Image (cartoon, helix red, strand yellow):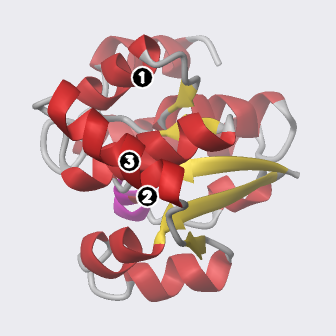
């Protein structure tokens, strides 16, 4: 089982399209700092409970991750505390980071941490045979319909996949 350090925004995207369980079809164990789970997964109501029920694992920071979080906060001023925490967990544990946050992706690249976002998760679900073509296209269309509102994804990437799944 592969582990993925989880940021909040991808969960929000899947929540908006009412497909919160989809990422859990993949052979990943999603982990998120315990404090981030308590403080970031507050809205929409029930998000935290749903994610924990689906298998999201809250984790404590190691000492090394604590110090990495501090250093990332000083190095990357555009990141929130919990962005720094998710990046520190991914870097220290040598696992992938799940995020759609642009500033966090840039920091991850600079730190040599691989990452995946909402569209990447959908691609893996479809390409791996976990969801059917109709579900894949429907998920992309739902994201596109909410883009610029509750969802912030590259419109051209969504459209390209809708037209050529």
Q: CA distance from mark 2 to mark 1?
A: 17 Å
User: In front: mark 2 or mark 3?
Assistant: 3
Numbered badge on residue 72? none
- In the rendered image, is residue 19 in sight? no
Tell me which residue sits at (58%, 23%) in the image: 114
The alpha-carbon separation of the residues under discs 2 and 3 comes to 26 Å
**x 63%, y 35%: residue:** 96
Task: Pinpoint residue 90: horizontal percent, then vertical percent.
Answer: 56, 41
Q: Earlier in the sequence, mark 2 or mark 3?
A: 2
> What label sits on residue 11 in the rendered view?
2
Residue 39 in the image, given as x and y percentages of width and height: 26, 76
Return the mark for residue 67.
3
Query: Residue, x 59% and y 40% (percent of image)?
Result: 92
Up the image or down, 38 lies above or below 26; here it is: below
Which residue range is magenta in the image? 12-17
Crowding near the residue tagged with mark 2, few <14, some 14–19, many ≥20 C-alpha atoms within 10 Å:
many
Q: Residues within 10 Å of mark 3 (few under 14, many from 20)?
A: some
Can the viewer see residue 11?
yes
Tag nearer the camera, 2 or 1: 2
Q: Main secondary structure of the magenta part?
A: helix
Asked whether, in this view, residue 91 is left or right of residue 9, the answer is right
Which comes before the other along the chain, label 2 or label 1? 2
Question: What percent of the width, then of the height, locates residue 127?
Answer: 80, 27
The residues tagged by marks 1 and 3 sit, at their Cα atoms, a distance apart of 37 Å
The answer to whether residue 3 is above or below residue 157 is below
Q: Nearer the viewer, residue 72 or 19?
A: 72
Q: Is residue 132 left or right of residue 19?
A: right
Q: Is residue 89 magenta?
A: no
Q: Is residue 14 magenta?
A: yes
Residue at label 1?
A: 158
Residue occupying the point 28% across, 36% down? 71
């Amino acid at each position: 089982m592969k582990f993925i350090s989880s940021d909040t925004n991808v969960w929000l995207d899947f929540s908006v399209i009412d497909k919160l369980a989809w990422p859990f079809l993949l052979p990943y164990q999603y982990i998120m700092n315990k404090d981030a789970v308590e403080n970031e997964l507050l809205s929409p109501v029930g998000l935290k409970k749903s994610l924990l029920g689906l298998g999201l694992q809250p984790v404590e920071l190691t000492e090394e991750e604590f110090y990495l979080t501090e250093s990332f906060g000083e190095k990357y001023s555009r990141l929130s505390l919990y962005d720094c925490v998710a990046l520190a967990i991914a870097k220290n544990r040598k696992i992938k980071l799940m995020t759609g946050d642009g500033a966090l992706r840039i920091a991850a690249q600079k730190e040599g941490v691989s990452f995946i976002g909402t569209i990447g998760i959908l691609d893996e679900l479809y390409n791996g045979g976990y969801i059917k073509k109709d579900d894949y296209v429907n998920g992309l269309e739902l994201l596109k319909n909410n883009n610029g509102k509750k969802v912030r994804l590259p419109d051209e990437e969504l459209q390209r996949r809708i037209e050529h799944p």
